[in-house]
Amino acid sequence: MAVTIDDIAKAAGVSSATVSRVLNNSGYVKDETREKVLKAIKELNYTPSAIARSLSKKKTNTIGVVVPEINNPFFGEIIKGISEVADEHNFNLILCNTDEDIKKELRALKLLKEQRIEGILITPTSTDSDYSSEYLWTIENLGIPVVLIDGHVKYSNFNGVFVDHIKGAYDAVKTLIDEGHEKIAIITGRMNSRPARERLAGYKKALKLHNIPIKEEYIFYGDYTHEKAYEITKKILEMKDRPTAIFVSSNMMVLGCIKAFSENNIEIPKDMAIIGFDKVEVLNIIGMNISFINGPTIEMGKIAMKMLIDILNNSQATDTKTINLSPQLVLKGSEKYVR
C-alpha cells in the first residue's frame, strides 16, 4: 500500500500541511520539526509523486513533443537536439508519434493538454483535410506556447524553426545540371505539405534558370514513404525517354529508389544519378555513397527548445519569431553524369 502525506504526518506527529511545506521547501518550518519529518520520510521509504508536487507548484517542467514519423532518422535527430537542451534546463519530455494521421495528432494534442504540460514542440501533419478547422481550433486553444518545427499550420501565426526547402532543392538540381544532366526527374513528398511544395518549387526554379524545359512527365508525386518511391522508381526505369538523374524529396524515399535500382541492376551513378533530401545514416554504414541535402536537424531541435524556453521565461512577449535554417549539400559522387 502506498505511503501518503497523512502517514508521514502521523509518524512525525505533525500536520499534513507541515509535511507538505517540507516536501515543497516552502514556508517556515522549525529545524527540529523538519528533522522529524525527514526521518519519518526515510523510515517509511516515501517517494513523493512528481505529478502531485507539480500540481502544488502549478508547474510541471514538462514539454510535449509531437512528430509524424518517429522511425524516421530526421525526427530522431530533432528529438536528440530537443532532449539535449531540455536536460540542461531540467525539463521533462512527453513524446507523441502521429504516423502522419491528423486524427491521431488531434488526440495527442488533447492528451498533452490534460497532462498540464507547459509548451509543445510539434511538426504538424498537413491540415489540408476535413479536420483542418477542428485542428486549428484545438491547437490555438491549448492555452500554452506552441513552437513549430519544419512544418506549418494554415491560417495561423505560431513561432517556429524551419528549413529553407526551396534553396535545398535548388542546390541539388543545380548540381545535377552542372554535372551535365538535363533529363532530371523529381519524386515529391505529399503535396498537401509545405516542404513538399517548396522542394518542387526549388526543382522547377533550377530548371527554369538554366533554360531546361519543365516536363510534367518527369514530375512524380510521392508520399514520403519508401514503398511509394519504390513503385515510382520502377515506372521511371520503364520510361522510353527516361531521365538520367532523380532528385528525391525525402530520405525514406531514397531507400525505395535504391531497392528498385538493385532489383533492376541499375548502377549509381553509371545508369542513374540520384540526390536525396536529408541523409540516410544506414547508407553511410554500408558504404553506399548517396549525395544528399543535409538539413541541420539536431540544431533545429536545439533552437526550437531554446525558443520555447525563452517564451516560457518571457510570457509578456507577443511578437512571433521564426527562424529559417539553410541546408547544406553533401556530395558523395551519386550526382555524377557518366557518359
Image (cartoon, grey):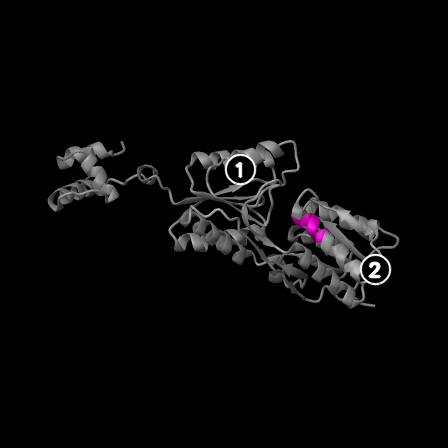
Given residues 87 and 210, the one toward you in this image is: 210
Q: Identify the image quadrant of residue 41.
A: top left
Residue 127, compared with residue 317, is above or below; it is: above
Report x, y in % for residue 159.
Answer: 53, 48
Q: Which mark identifies residue 212? A: 2
In the depicted view, which residue is nearer to us: 298 or 271? 298
Q: Is residue 223 left or right of residue 107?
A: right
Q: CA distance from mark 2 to mark 1?
A: 43 Å
Q: Is residue 22 left or right of residue 326?
A: left
Going by the image, does 212 lie left or right of 228?
Answer: right
**Prevalent SS, magenta region:** helix
Report which residue position mark 1 lands on.
Answer: 139
Q: Which residues are magenta?
A: 195-200
Is disc 2 placed on a helix, strand or loop? loop
- Residue 114 sits in which quadrant? top left
Which amino acid is tagged 1? Ile
- Asked if the magenta segment contains residue 55, the reply would be no
Residue 59 lies, in percent from the top left, at: 36, 41
Kind of residue sitting beneath label 2:
Ile
Circles 2 and 1 in contact, beta carbons < 8 Å: no
Regarding residue 36, the answer to whether it shows in the image is yes
Quadrant in the picture for residue 100: top right
Q: Residue at x 60, y 47 (%)?
A: 151
N-terminal-most mark, 2 or 1: 1
- The quarter of the rendered structure image containing the C terminus is bottom right
